[in-house]
Every structure is written in C-alpha cells, then in structure tokens.
Amino acid sequence: MRIHTKSIAWNREDLVFCNERVIYWQKEDALILSDLHIGKAAHFRKNGIPVPTQIHEKDLNRLARLIHYFGAKRVIMVGDMLHANDNIEVQDFMRFIEENHAIDFLLVKGNHDRMNDKYLLNMGLSSVSTQYLLHALLFVHEPVADSLFPQITGHIHPGIVLPLPTRRTLRLPAFVVSPELIVLPAFSNFTGLDTKSKYNDAVYYACYEGGIAEIA
C-alpha cells in the first residue's frame, strides 16, 4: 500500500493521519497506533487453524516502513499489542524491538495484554501503563468516563460501510474523530471491523489503498 496522509487539527494539536492506520504526531516524533495483536496468527495455528505466517510478517514490515518514513523516535501503542501468551511471533517482535533500540516503544495495556509488567518491560518496552497522559492528551485502550482530557483510544477496530453500485458495499477500517475522542483503527490486518458502534458528532476517516476519505 502506498502511504497517504491527511493533516488534522484536534484539541490544539496537529496530527497526521495515515492510510496505514497510524497517526504521526510530529511534535513528539511519535507514531500512535493500536491493536497490533502480535502472536494472534501463531495462537490460531497452535489451536489447529491454518493461518499463514505472512500476516504477522507483513504487519511488522509495515511498522518498520512507517517508522522509517516518518522518522519516528517513539511508538505509542494504545493497547492489545499482544494477542495471547508467549509464542514464536511474540519472540519475533522482541527481536524487532531490539533491532529498533533507538526507538522508545510505549505500551498502554489493553484487554489482551495479559502478561505481567515485568515480562513486558523485559521485551524491551520503554514503559508500560494502563493510561498515558502527554500534553493534555490521554491515551487509553478503552474510553474513560468523565475524563478531564481528550482521549485517544483503540479496542473496537472501527470501520465504515460504503455503498457501491449494484447494491454492493465496501467495508474499510477508519479513524473515528469526535471533539473529545479519537478511536484508532486496528493496525493489524488480521482483525475484524466494528461497523455498528455509533459516536456523537463524529467524523470517519476511512483508510484505503489510494488515500484517506473523510466521511461525516
């Protein structure tokens, strides 16, 4: 997929949305993404479901390409970095972090990140937390009720359904942006899409190979 970007001003911050399902925050030299689900393909294979290893490899190759493209010095992962317990793909991601030792990898834990903090830090992460506050933006896997700060979240793998001719439809991953909330699309290609959840005053930014489509 060719990289396309769209600049957004949100809560006094300039953010760059990318059709590869990440946000680049130039002020912090940070890539922001959610739901990598590292180890999911291997977990399925272990349970007798034949999922190809190329899915995992393509996700890591995309991440490496995006770090290089934006020149990011920090990667903020908003939950579900891992999918299950330790497996060969988790070990592969540990090597990925080691190879990119100049990058700070920060994890905001999600419901799938069940490893204890000591294990996660030993993977090479710079920090592990359940919430991360930076410049009055709150990073959390699932929205927090009555937050004092605008939130950037993940978890639901948001998408949108677009009508096509001859009664067909197209389902695309999307950023959901409302005045006080951004919901990130899942970074991994090996995830489903939630096209049913609704948000008040939200704009969708659908990600596709040719760019990013703003849909009010």
Image (cartoon, rainbow, N blue to C red):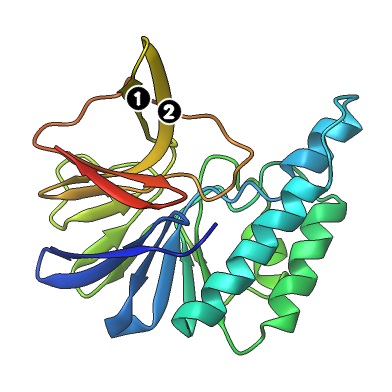
Q: Residue 16's quadrant in the figure?
A: bottom left
Q: Where residue 106 appears, x then y in whole percent?
A: 51, 70
SS label for mark 2: strand
Q: 206 or 139: which is nearer to us?
A: 206
Residue at the disc numbered 1? 161
Neighbourhood count class around disc 2 (C-alpha, 10 Å): few under 14, some 14–19, many 20 upward: some
* Type of amino acid at the residue the image marks with label 1: Val
Q: Where residue 157 appears, x then y in whole percent?
A: 44, 37
* Type of amino acid at the residue the image marks with label 2: Arg
Q: Where residue 169 appears, x then y in whole percent?
A: 39, 19
Q: Where residue 158 appears, x then y in whole percent?
A: 38, 35
Q: Residue 146's quadrant in the figure?
A: top left
Q: 104 or 189: which is nearer to us?
A: 189
Q: Marks 1/2: CA distance?
A: 5 Å
The residue lying at 85 percent from left, 50 percent from top is 87
Which quadrant, please, contains the N terminus? bottom right
Q: Circles 1 and 2: CB distance less than 8 Å? A: yes
Dot 1 or dot 2: first in sequence order is 1
The residue lying at 35 percent from left, 21 percent from top is 164
Count of number-bearing discs: 2
SS label for mark 1: strand
Q: Is residue 190 left or right of residue 152?
A: right
Which quadrant, please, contains the C terminus? top left
Neighbourhood count class around disc 1 (C-alpha, 10 Å): few under 14, some 14–19, many 20 upward: some
User: Extreme top residue here?
Assistant: 167
Q: Is residue 89 left or right of residue 97?
A: right
Q: Which mark is residue 107?
A: none
The residue lying at 68 percent from left, 62 percent from top is 60
Residue at the disc numbered 2? 171
User: Extreme front residue here?
Assistant: 166
The residue lying at 81 percent from left, 32 percent from top is 44
* In this view, 100 is above or below 108: below
